Amino acid sequence: MQTLLPVAPDAPLSSGYPAAPVVARLSAAPGVQRTPSPKLTLFQHRGFLDPADCAPFIDRIDATRRPSTVSDYNGDAGFRTSETCDIARDDPLSVALDLRIAALTGLDPAYGEPLQGQRYAVGQEFKQHTDYFEPGGLDYERYCGVHGQRTWTVMIYLNEPQAGGATRFKVIDKIIQPETGKLLAWDNRRPDGTPNAATLHAGMKVRAGAKYVLTKWFRERPWG
């Protein structure tokens, strides 16, 4: 049963580039916490979604999940071992969630990639990585030539595994535990717009149960 209802943004939306309007909006939002670090811009919001909102997304992930991939293969077959599901932009749940994210962050859905779901079974992980594409990388032009670099990442935990599955930001030694409905949002760039290596993070191994998350990436130019 669909429970997620859209919440229309009440202020002008931003592309997320530059970051100041998004930072200001998140900083002023009730229930949102900013990680105190000069090295990166990272926010958390517990209870962004209710468990009843999360359940239909878990069903969609289970219905169409496939092995996850990476853009520039580094030779490590165990680097990313989760499963992935693409959720159509016109899926009513995706449309409603896009509006909710926009209302919270001020990020314009037009600049967002299609919503992606991931499932991590016991032992599965995503080792230390950044969400932006490395300038000069093998597939940089393929992934960024039209839509530009990734700006913001918005990630939502859909459940709580029995053990493990935390997200670790190595540079600031910050470990965030998965909680049902918790949202994370971070800027993948430095203030000057260049990629921020301090956003290096990992999806740590699940030790018991399974972990489900949603990820929404935003770009410098509209998607479509």
Image: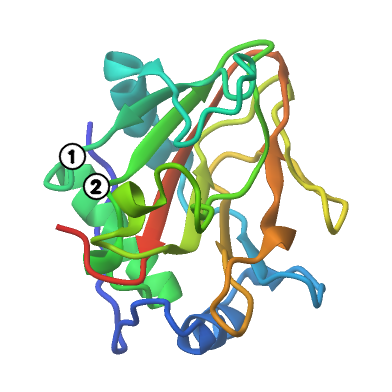
- Within the image, what quadrant is residue 87 found in? top left
> Does 2 appear above or below 224?
above
Near-viewer residue (57 or 31): 57
- Element on which disc 1 rests: loop
Q: Is residue 108 left or right of residue 28?
A: left
Front position in the image: 3 or 41: 41
Q: From the viewer's perspective, is residue 182 above or below residue 76?
A: below
Identify which amino acid the numbered label 1 is placed on. Answer: Ala
Q: Position of residue 86 (x, y in %)?
A: 28, 33
Sequence-wise first label, 1 or 2: 1
Secondary structure beneath dot 2 equals helix
Query: On residue 94, which mark appears?
Result: 2
Q: Look at the numbered discs 1 and 2 and tell me whether their residues touch, using CB distance below 8 Å.
A: yes
- Residue 78 % position (x, y): 64, 16
- Point out residue 190 in the picture as x, y percentages from the top left corner: 63, 76
Q: Nearer the viewer, mark 1 or mark 2?
A: 1
Identity of the residue drawn at 73% across and 29% down = 204
Query: Is 82 left, or right, of 107 in this rendering?
Result: right
The quarter of the displayed image where residue 145 is located: bottom left
Task: Residue 214: give x, y in percent of width and height.
Answer: 44, 40
Q: Which residue is mark 1?
A: 88
Disc 2 residue type (three-letter):
Ser
**Compared with residue 50, is residue 81 higher up or lower down, i.e. above or below?**
above
